[in-house]
Image (spheres, helix red, strand yellow):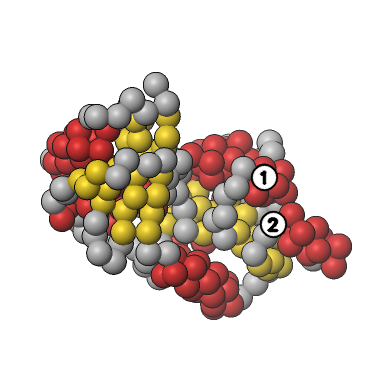
């Protein structure tokens, strides 16, 4: 009974996304309740926004449908294995940094994990300060890549981050400051689900979830969609009903 209650508590924890101002959004894939809870508590105390996945299937769905700045991935999971998830992510072109956290400590295991597409490999048990150092290193590496990019494009839509000029099909689009920031964010994660929580945190800079802000976000999305898509047959800004939004090229 005690073990059953522990698993129920863990599943509730895995389904709860902690919303507050965080440095980055991390997906922690771990099926051991005590380890998962320790990681969530430790990482949230460091200012990270942590989402838990307890099974291979849940991790696979989240990693493919949501944006994360880093994935901490266990290898031995119920359902899909960590290596299966990693291999599919890389085949699908997902470049999200992946740090493997596992008890598998042989040289062959490390080589297989890195060859499959992991960016780093840490063996359990590990010192928490070392984990934090590796997370910071991987996130810095990703930030360095992002700073090089000055333009974001999708189909015939082009956004210049430096000049803040936006055009589609060669025609200039007049956007407000907030509309520009909103479009830039959607294009940064094009092809990936962007939730209202992410927009509230990163575009509106709200420290806590404010339900009334959802309507404000919806209004801005509607105005932005009108300017970007109204005169074109292929729509670029899409609503994922009840969840959020996605920028992708979808011919009618």
Q: Is residue 2 above or below residue 122?
A: above
- Residue 134 appears in view: yes
- The label number, if any, that marks residue 117 in the structure image: 2
Nearer to the camera, 126 or 214? 214
Dot 2: element:
loop
Q: Residue at x 70, y 47 (%)?
A: 87
- CA distance separating discs 2 and 1: 10 Å
Q: Residue at x 27, y 47 (%)?
A: 167
Q: Nearer the viewer, mark 2 or mark 1?
A: 1
- The label number, if any, that marks residue 156 in the structure image: none
Report the side of 190 relative to 124 (left or right).
left
Report the side of 122 relative to 135 (left or right).
right
In this view, the residue farthest toward the front is 170
The image position of residue 208, as x and y in percent, is: 22, 54
Nearer to the camera, 33 or 249? 249
Report the side of 63 relative to 233 (left or right).
right
Assess disc 2: are there few (<14), some (14-19) or many (≥20) residues with their C-alpha within 10 Å of its C-alpha.
Answer: some
The image position of residue 41, as x and y in percent, is: 44, 62
| Residue at the disc numbered 1 | 91
Report the side of 131 relative to 182 (left or right).
right
Dot 1: element:
helix
């Amino acid at each position: 009974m005690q073990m059953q209650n522990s698993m129920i508590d863990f599943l509730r924890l895995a389904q709860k996304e902690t919303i507050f101002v965080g440095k980055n959004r991390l997906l922690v894939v771990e099926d051991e309740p005590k380890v998962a809870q320790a990681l969530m508590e430790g990482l949230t105390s460091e200012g990270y926004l942590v989402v838990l996945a307890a099974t291979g299937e849940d991790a696979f769905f989240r990693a493919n449908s949501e944006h994360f700045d880093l994935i901490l991935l266990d290898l031995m999971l119920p359902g899909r294995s960590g290596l299966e998830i990693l291999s599919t992510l890389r085949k699908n072109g997902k470049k999200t940094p992946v740090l493997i956290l596992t008890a598998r400590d042989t040289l062959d295991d490390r080589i297989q994990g890195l060859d499959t597409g992991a960016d780093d490999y840490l063996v359990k048990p590990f010192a928490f300060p070392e984990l934090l150092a590796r997370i910071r290193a991987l996130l810095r590496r990703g930030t360095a890549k992002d700073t090089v990019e000055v333009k974001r494009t999708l189909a015939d839509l082009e956004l210049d981050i430096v000049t803040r000029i936006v055009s589609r099909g060669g025609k200039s689009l007049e956007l407000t400051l907030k509309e520009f920031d909103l479009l830039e964010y959607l294009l940064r994660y094009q092809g990936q689900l962007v939730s209202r929580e992410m927009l509230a945190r990163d575009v509106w800079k709200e420290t806590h979830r404010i339900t009334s802000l959802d309507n404000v976000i919806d209004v801005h999305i509607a105005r932005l969609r009108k300017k970007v898509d109204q005169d074109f047959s292929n729509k670029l800004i899409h609503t994922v009903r009840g969840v959020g939004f996605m920028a992708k090229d979808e011919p009618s």
